[in-house]
Structure formats: C-alpha cells, structure tokens
Amino acid sequence: MPSPAFNPGFRISMLDVVVLFLGASFAANIGAARPWFGVAIAFPIAHFFVFCNVVRMARPLELTWAAAFVVLAAITVVLEAWSWPVTLGLSLILSIALVTVELRKPSYHGAFWRQINPGLPEWWEANIAANRSEIC
C-alpha cells in the first residue's frame, strides 16, 4: 500500500461544502419550528467539519465525542433530564478537551500546524508506516 502524501493543514472538498450547505439548510428548516432541535442538528455538523477539516482529529477522539453527544442528546430528548443548553454546553466542554489533546500530539497536522507542531515533517517521516488509522 503506498504511503499517503504529506498534506497537513486545513482542507475542504466539494463534498464538505455540499454537506455543510445541506446540513445548514436542514437545521434552519427544523429550527424555524423547533429552535433547539435546529441547533442540535447544526452543532454536530459544525463539529465534524472542525474535527475533520480544521483540526484533523484522530478518529478515536471524533468517535468519543460522537458517542458522548448521542448519549447526552438521548438524555435530553428521551429522559427529559435536562435542556439542550446543558447538552450543548457539556458537548462543547468535551470538544475543547479533545481538541486540546489533539493539538498536543506529535502527529498534529491540522490548521496552523507549522506554528503548533513545527516538528511534524520529522514525525511524519519517522512514523509514516505506523498506525494509519490514527490519522484523520
């Protein structure tokens, strides 16, 4: 299997633009009738854009956030234990923690990687054959 090209930094594709546009449209339409549901739809769409395109977070951290958001949303909708602001606030705190973890990795290759992780090219050369599933 050929090694992936060294291509760190922010990225965006036409598919990303389409998903963001459709997601924003759907969230706005739902939000017109049920504002917090609209926000609850837009919130994970925006997060996955940031995680995959800006920070380029490792898959296990993305999935950790997704699982936590699903559990918190279920508690909000099914159990009515608390409101959407609580769910979104807790999810945002987790987002900040996970982004902080990602930024501190020697493999960080998202936006502003030159400033945050200037040793990335050396890490990439030394570890390119290592666990590729860790790299988003």
Image (spheres, grey):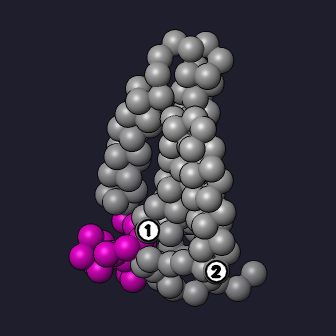
Q: Position of residue 114 (x, y in %)?
A: 29, 80
Mark-to-mark CA distance, 2 and 1: 15 Å
For label 2, the crowd category at 10 Å Cα-Cα, with few meaning under 14, some 14 to 19 and many 20 or more, is: few
For label 1, the crowd category at 10 Å Cα-Cα, with few meaning under 14, some 14 to 19 and many 20 or more, is: some
Q: Residue at x 50, y 84 (%)?
A: 7
Query: Which of the 4 quarters of the picture holds residue 12?
Result: bottom right
Please state, as top left, top right, bottom left or bottom right, where the N terminus lies in the image.
bottom right
Of residue 80 and residue 90, the one placed in the foreground of this image is 80
Q: Amino acid under label 1? A: Val
Verify CB contact (< 8 Å) between mark 2 and mark 1.
no
Q: Position of residue 23 (x, y in %)?
A: 63, 58
Of residue 36 and residue 6, the one placed in the foreground of this image is 36
Q: Residue at x 58, y 87 (%)?
A: 5
Q: Residue at x 27, y 70 (%)?
A: 116
Does the rendering let one see residue 62?
A: no
Please state, as top left, top right, bottom left or bottom right, where the C terminus lies in the image.
bottom right
Residue 29 position (above or below residue 19): above
Q: Residue at x 51, y 85 (%)?
A: 6
Q: Read off the residue under disc 2.
A: 14
Residue 40 position (above or below residue 15): above
- Mark 1 or mark 2, which is nearer the start of the sequence? 2
Residue range (magenta)? 106-122
Q: Secondary structure at mark 2?
A: helix
Query: Which of the 4 quarters of the picture holds residue 132?
Result: bottom right
Is 127 inside the magenta-drawn segment? no
Furthest toward the left, the residue is 115
Residue 46 position (above or below residue 77): below
Is 120 inside the magenta-drawn segment? yes
The disc at residue 17 is none
Q: Amino acid under label 2? A: Met
Furthest toward the right, the residue is 1
Q: Read off the residue under disc 1.
A: 54
